Amino acid sequence: MTTANHTNQHVLVINCGSSSLKYQLLNADHTTEALASGLIERIGQAQSTLTHRHGSHKRRIEQAIPDHAAALDAMQAAFVETATPLSETNLVAVAHRVVHGGEKFVAPVLVTDEVEKTIASLIPLAPLHNPANLQGIRTARNIFDNLPQVAVFDTAFHSTMPEHARTYAVPRQWREQYGVRRYGFHGTSHSYVSREAARILGRDVADCNVIVAHLGNGASISAVQGGRCIDTSMGMTPLEGLIMGTRCGDIDPALIFYLHRQTGASFEELDQTLNQKSGMAALAGESDMRAVEAAADHGDADSQMALEAYAYRIRKYIGAYTAALGRVDAVVFTAGIGENSPGVRARVLDGLSGLGIEIDQEANHTPGTTVISTAVSSTKVLVIATNEESEIAQQAVALVRHMPDAD
């Protein structure tokens, strides 16, 4: 494959969930430039929905989409209907988000049959995510059989954690035979945002220490030193760490065995409860932060306490990661809640003046403001929109263009 002429080359980024498929078509040389994007929801249900955006145009289609193969066919049809068939976009690669790379994958890889088998072997580490990611890869390899397929892993950015940070104090057999350790997730977001933070601060990435708080329905926080992750809140699975929309975050592991004995609930039932019925949903009765904040504003005591618990957990991690980094140049908020909730940001940062953090309330409440700390704040506070698709595309293009035959 020859890629020397980079004019108007593109990369297609695919992110498959169990019943959804997100996609973006991005410029291979300027990966923040999306030519088109889309979301297919309720795959496998009686009525699925495809929302396709091309420039300022938006199309919404409702039709039966029984599986991911049909979803990719519907995606291609949407491109044709908007006069941008994928066959005419000069694609250089199809890039796939894969949630768990285990210890096998610490960088993007070109997908082969062997890579597929290895991703499949990691399903026990991410049973809710890796099967869908793998299904998307297999389907795309059949449809785009003449293009390189690149897998980019959520866990890869966190592979730089030192051994003492990633190791659990459990028996050696568990660690060596079963891969029990901290892996971390949301890696593409943490990578993109930490690099953007250095650019905004006017510092070299290698000389910039940041704490990144990726706050969405799923949430994680990381300590990034000189462009390398040295610690992160999610662990072997995405359940550990911060309080999330439906996930509990940090708990005493003995709680599981206690409830198994007391209630007779199976471990599968407890697993489902901790992942899908806990977090803000359990504390406030709502997993959507907007609904929780609205209820708190109207005096709901459960919602008010839930917000305090949510913010307190993040604040504790900021303190811990400040100690781990030694010097913090910026605390960065990103993802849906981090980017859009000034109330959550204010609650998290309240009382952190001892760490050199002073928030500018007016800037914090002004949409689109990047720097929300005061001029005297020794640690800057930034709000940066994440762009995981851009990061995935950039990593995929870099890999493809360094292939031996890419000359």
Image: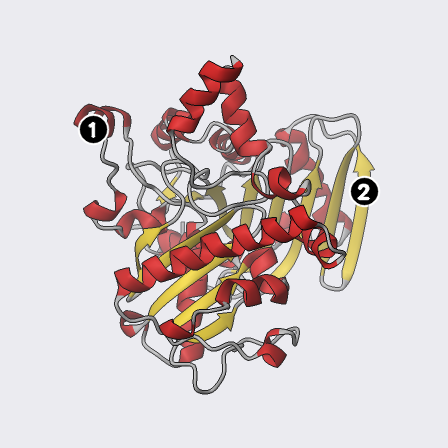
State the scheme by which the image is colored: secondary structure
Comes first in the chain, label 2 or label 1: 2
The part of the image, by quadrant, that contains residue 281 is top right
Q: Is residue 25 above or below residue 287?
A: below
Question: Residue under circle 1?
Answer: 176
Q: Which amino acid type is shown beneath numbered disc 2? A: Ile
Q: Is residue 297 left or right of residue 141?
A: right
Along the viewing direction, whichever of 247 and 348 lies nearer the viewer? 348
Quarter holding residue 208: bottom left
Quadrant holding the C terminus = bottom left
Q: Quadrant of residue 317?
A: bottom left
Percent position of residue 102, x then y = 33, 36
Task: Tell me where residue 6 appears, x and y as whole percent.
Answer: 47, 64
Residue labelled with disc 2: 61
- Residue 110 is tagged as none
The answer to whether residue 392 is visible is: no
Residue 26 x/y as whole percent: 56, 58
| Mark 2 to mark 1 CA distance (whole Å) | 48 Å
Above or below, comparing residue 66 to residue 216 in the picture: above
Along the viewing direction, whichever of 381 and 311 lies nearer the viewer: 311
Which structural element holds mark 2?
Answer: strand
> Does 167 sit left or right of 200 as displayed?
left
Where residue 361 appears, as percent x and y from the top left, is 59, 77
Few, some or many residues within 10 Å of mark 1 (<14, 14–19, 20+): few
Q: Is residue 223 left or right of residue 6?
A: left
Above or below, 6 against 140 in this view is: below
Closer to us: 326 or 255: 255
**In front of the other: 181 or 12:** 181
Could you tell me which residue is drawn at 55 percent across and 75 percent down?
370
Question: Which is in the foreground here, disc 2 or disc 1?
Answer: 1
Q: Kindly identify the amino acid type of the residue bearing the numbered disc 1.
A: Glu
Identify the residue at the far bottom of this view: 375
